[in-house]
Image (cartoon, rainbow, N blue to C red):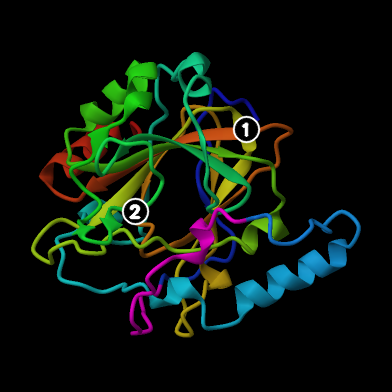
């Protein structure tokens, strides 16, 4: 595929999206963000069939912690995401220089695969991958403060500020290669709106691809009535360099299948829904 051309998202199993939720209390911690990977030896190369069994049982069975995260609320939301939960934007004309994201300080934080994250904006400006709801200082994923990493990536910082909307967590993700079946085992929804007052804008996330892997793709699915991903709503978004899109990751189950031969980097930013973000999205839509 010519990475200079914009590849459209495509539906794997076309069917109208459904929005449903299982009402359960929100768990205190989300297991997908655990950094403890050293509790057992890695036997995946010697026993790939065991790894496959673990993935299938983890993904298909309830309860799953993502199912506990609320779907419905009275928060103001974006019209652009109402139909499908995501919107593709036109590709960024001037890609972010490689020197910006390779120079950042990364932390060992696991979410959606073998990942490391470089915090660019956090709740208090410290290098921290956790959510904004630290005990005794609980707050919604908004009003982020730039970290020391932001000084190393001025173009990324300008990009985030150019949106003009209230931002929360801003991070660069480094994801090692993982195939489709392995990726499915890491599928999840995000708890973006914990402690977010119901009269304030719903928090969503934007993606900007920093590396060029046009054969890798984001997997998206709606939630079914059992609180699990609905395979019949599966959509793939290609991840070539400069690809931009906005997702309601609290609504959509998502994960990346990365087929490349090296790490994939992307900028992930939390933004509050409202007129500013809606205006930016409209200005970034592809020309018809």
Q: Which label belongs to residue 213?
A: 1
Please name the residue shown 64% across and 73% down the image.
58
Of the pair 130 and 261, the residue shown nearer to us: 130
- Give coordinates of residue 110: x percent, y percent: 55, 51
- Label 2 – label 1 distance at C-alpha: 28 Å
In the rendered image, the quadrant that contains the N terminus is top right
Is 68 placed above or below 5 here?
A: below
Q: Residues within 10 Å of mark 2 (few under 14, many from 20)?
A: some
Q: Secondary structure at mark 1?
A: strand
Please name the residue shown 42% across and 66% down the image.
29
Q: Earlier in the sequence, mark 2 or mark 1?
A: 2
Q: Quadrant of residue 200?
A: bottom left
Q: For this view, does 245 lie left or right of residue 280?
A: right
Is 28 placed above or below 276 here?
A: below
Q: Secondary structure at mark 2?
A: loop
Q: How many marks?
A: 2
Does the magenta portion include 219?
no
Query: Which is the main secondary structure of the residues drawn in magenta?
Result: loop
Is 241 placed above or below 271 here?
A: above
Q: Which label belongs to residue 131?
A: 2
Which span of residues is magenta-colored?
18-36
In the rendered image, the quadrant that contains the C terminus is top left
Of the pair 152 and 264, the residue shown nearer to us: 152
Of the pair 206 and 115, the residue shown nearer to us: 115
- Give coordinates of residue 224: x percent, y percent: 47, 78
Q: Residues within 10 Å of mark 1 (few under 14, many from 20)?
A: many
- Give coordinates of residue 169: x percent, y percent: 32, 43
Please name the residue shown 26% across and 64% down the image.
194
Does the magenta portion include 23?
yes
Q: For this view, does 115 lie left or right of residue 168?
A: right
């Amino acid at each position: 595929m010519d990475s200079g051309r914009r590849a459209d998202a495509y539906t794997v199993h076309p069917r109208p999206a459904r929005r449903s939720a299982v009402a359960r209390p929100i768990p205190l911690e989300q297991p997908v963000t655990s950094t403890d990977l050293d509790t057992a030896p890695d036997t995946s190369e010697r026993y790939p069939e065991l790894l496959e069994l673990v993935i299938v049982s983890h993904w298909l069975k309830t309860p799953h912690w993502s199912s506990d995260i609320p779907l419905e609320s009275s928060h103001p939301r974006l019209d652009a995401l109402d139909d499908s939960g995501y919107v593709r934007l036109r590709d960024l004309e001037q890609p972010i220089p490689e020197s910006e994201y390779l120079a950042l300080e990364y932390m060992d934080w696991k979410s959606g695969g073998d990942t490391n994250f470089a915090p660019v904006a956090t709740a208090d400006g410290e290098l921290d991958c956790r959510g904004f709801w630290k005990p005794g200082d609980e707050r919604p994923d908004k009003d982020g403060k730039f970290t020391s990493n932001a000084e190393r990536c001025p173009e990324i910082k300008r990009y985030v500020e150019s949106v003009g909307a209230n931002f929360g967590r801003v991070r660069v993700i480094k994801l090692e290669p993982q195939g489709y079946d392995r990726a499915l085992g890491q599928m999840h929804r995000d708890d973006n709106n914990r402690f977010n007052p119901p009269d304030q804008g719903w928090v969503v996330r934007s993606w900007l691809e920093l590396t060029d892997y046009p054969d890798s793709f984001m997997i998206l699915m709606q939630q079914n009535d059992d609180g699990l991903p609905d395979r019949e709503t599966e959509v793939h978004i290609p991840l070539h360099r400069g690809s931009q899109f906005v997702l309601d990751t609290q609504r959509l189950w998502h994960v990346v299948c990365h087929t490349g031969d090296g790490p994939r980097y992307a900028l992930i930013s939390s933004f509050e829904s409202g007129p500013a973000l809606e205006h930016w999205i409209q200005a970034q839509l592809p020309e018809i």
